[in-house]
Each structure stands twice: as structure tokens, then as C-alpha cells.
Amino acid sequence: MTIRHDRSSGNAHFLLHWRDPTKVGHAGGLYQVLPVGIFQPSGEQLDHERNDFSLWRCLIREFAEELLGEKESSGGPINYEQWPFAVELSDAKRDRRVRPYCLGIGVDPLTFATDLLSVVVFDAAVFDALFGELVETNAEGELIGGEVSRIPGIPFNEAHVTQLLSDHPMQSAGAAVLALAWSKRQVLLAA
């Protein structure tokens, strides 16, 4: 889950994704928080496994793909130390302007798909600088509430969280991480 947090106003927004059933093989037609992806290397060669065995690096690739519309890697191993997006994101993480959390592991009771329930909280200025070119659609569906000209995302408040969890067809891991993030909001937004 991605949260954009404006520390000065205290406002927070999160991104939501509608997974287009014509584009995805899993959870088509459902809403999901962003990013979502399979924890796997960017390629099949052993070099990729060694290079990409990192939840953080997986998140970097998913942010680039789902929020900026970049293609999944199909070439050699990614040089994260020279990829400007990865460097900026990792520097912001090191400075605590981007704060990743793992809230748990969820297992879909119907498919047995296992998900790491993670939240990444971005200071608003960092989010705006990194995702100024936020896409409205990507290879897997459509961003909901991703207005580029205004604050992107859906307000992270009780009314919106409750409405999504009760009135929208949510992918189970997305619903779980949204509910957990709401219950842990004081910790997530305090750092």
C-alpha cells in the first residue's frame, strides 16, 4: 500500500488500483492497493536472483511499473545504484522521508495466494517529486483517485476506508492491508 503523507497538514492519501480482468490473470475486476506484485527476480538468470533478492528492490520495480508505467525488466540485471529512480527512492528511505513497513502475511482462503502486507509511507514532497508523472492506467488496470493535477489518491480517513472495505469488491490482501494500515495509522503516520 502506498500512502502520501503531508506532515504539515496531517493529511494522508492512498492509491487504489482497479485490476482490469482483460489484462491480469489474478484478481481481475477487483480493487487493490498499490503497488502489488510477485516477490521475484526481474529475470530468470541466477544473476537476477542474487541482485533482486530484496523486498525493497521488488517494491522499487513495482512502483516504477505501476505508478510511472515503466516496463518490467527483460534485459540484464538492474543496476539499482545507477538507476536514478532507485537511487532517489533509496536515499529518501535512508533519510526516513520514505518509510516502508511490513504489517504481516496474508493468505487468500480461496486461492491460497500468499501476500506480504506492506505499506510504504511517503512524505508528500518526495511522493510529488518521484511521481509527478503518475499514470492513470498501467499494464494491469486503472489508478483510482490518481488525479495528477491535484493531490493524488483517496483520503486516508475512516469514511473512505470503511466505504471501500464494505462497498467495493476488494482483493483480499488489499482489504487486509488497508484495514491493518487504518488500525496502525498512528504509528505509520507518526514517524
Image (cartoon, helix red, strand yellow):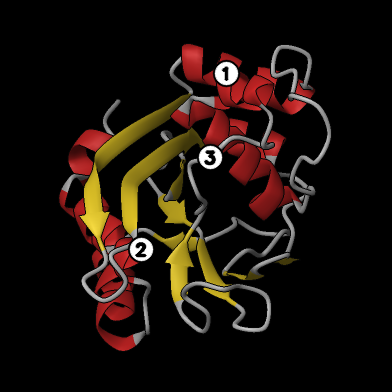
Is 111 situated above or below 119?
Answer: below
Which of the 4 quarters of the picture holds residue 176? bottom left
Which residue carries the number 1 mark?
A: 50
Check disc 1 and give the amino acid type.
Answer: Arg
- Residue under the point 60% across and 31% down: 126
Check disc 2 and give the amino acid type.
Answer: Gly
Is 145 situated above or below 12?
Answer: below
User: Residue 173: x percent and y percent?
Assistant: 32, 62
Which of the 4 quarters of the picture holds residue 166? bottom left
CA gap, disc 1 and disc 2: 29 Å
Which residue carries the number 3 mark?
A: 40
Foreground of the two, 166 or 185? 166
- Residue under the point 61% across and 73% down: 24
Residue count near mark 3 (Cα–Cα under 10 Å), binned few <14, some 14–19, many ≥20? some
Q: Is residue 28 left or right of residue 113?
A: right
Foreground of the two, 3 or 72? 72
User: Residue 159: x percent and y percent?
Assistant: 27, 73
Report if the CB atoms under discs 3 and 1 are less than 8 Å apart: no
Residue count near mark 1 (Cα–Cα under 10 Å), binned few <14, some 14–19, many ≥20? few
| Mark linked to residue 153 | none
CA gap, disc 3 and disc 1: 11 Å
